[in-house]
Amino acid sequence: MSDTVGAPGRDCPGRRPELPTHDEMASWRTFLRAHAGVTRMLESELEAEQKLSLAAYDVLVQLSEAPEHRLRMTELAEAVLLSRSGVTRLVDRLERSGLVLRAKVAEDGRGVTATLTDAGQERLRIASTTHLRGVRRHFADRLDPADLAELARISRKLIP
């Protein structure tokens, strides 16, 4: 993979210091490929075995872990890393399936919450077997305990 951005080494006189080096770009691309590959496998297994997208699974997890299994739509969008419109469309589908209920916030006429239903909790319980087995197979089993600890340490540095 050839790359002109940051191609000169860190100590190369012609390098602009604000641009990443070739090695930094290689690390970045490896990180992206690893994330995309594992995510694709997890998504594929959830879709095939559970007819549930990874994003929908994530919404159900976030609601399951929230107090009273309820979050404001804005909080849910932040938690699942989707745009507000993206989470709205996803919650629309989950609501039509009976997995989530939406309601206006009584104290705030503009606010809307999403709440996990009993059916949603059961759907999550069943789908979790597929997802957690995939996390084990495609992620945890490929790393030894020291690798996992190092990855966690590095990942914490990357969280904004």
Image (cartoon, helix red, strand yellow):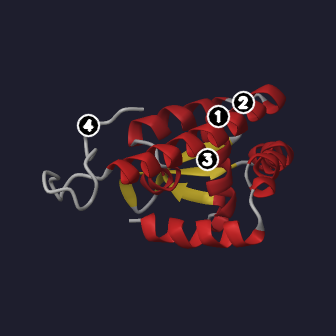
Q: Which residue is mark 1?
A: 40
Q: Residues within 10 Å of mark 4 (few under 14, many from 20)?
A: few
Calculate the distance from the C-alpha at mark 3 to the C-alpha at mark 4.
Answer: 39 Å
Q: CA distance from mark 1 to mark 2?
A: 6 Å
- Residue contact between numbered discs 1 and 2, judged by CB atoms under 8 Å: yes
- Which mark lies nearer to you, 4 or 2? 4
Nearest to N terminus: mark 2 or mark 3: 2
Location of residue 106 by image quarter: bottom left
Residue drawn at (30%, 52%) of the image: 21
From the image, tell me which residue sits under label 2. 44
Q: Residue at x 20, y 56 (%)?
A: 12
Residue nearest the observer in this picture, 53 or 22: 22
Q: Nearer the viewer, residue 53 or 119?
A: 53
**Which residue is painted at 14% across and 57% down in the image?**
13
Separation (CA) of disc 4 from disc 2 = 34 Å
Mark 3 secondary-structure assignment: helix
One can see residue 56 in this view = no
Q: The disc labelled 4 sits on which kind of residue?
A: Thr
Left or right position of 39 against 1: right
From mark 1 to mark 4, how far is it between C-alphas? 29 Å
> Which amino acid, by three-letter code, is at mark 1?
Arg
Camera-side residue of 67 and 130 = 130
Q: Secondary structure at mark 2?
A: helix
Q: Which of label 3 and label 1 is nearer to you?
A: 1
Three-letter code, disc 3: Val
Label at residue 59: 3
Nearer the N terminus, badge 3 or badge 1? 1
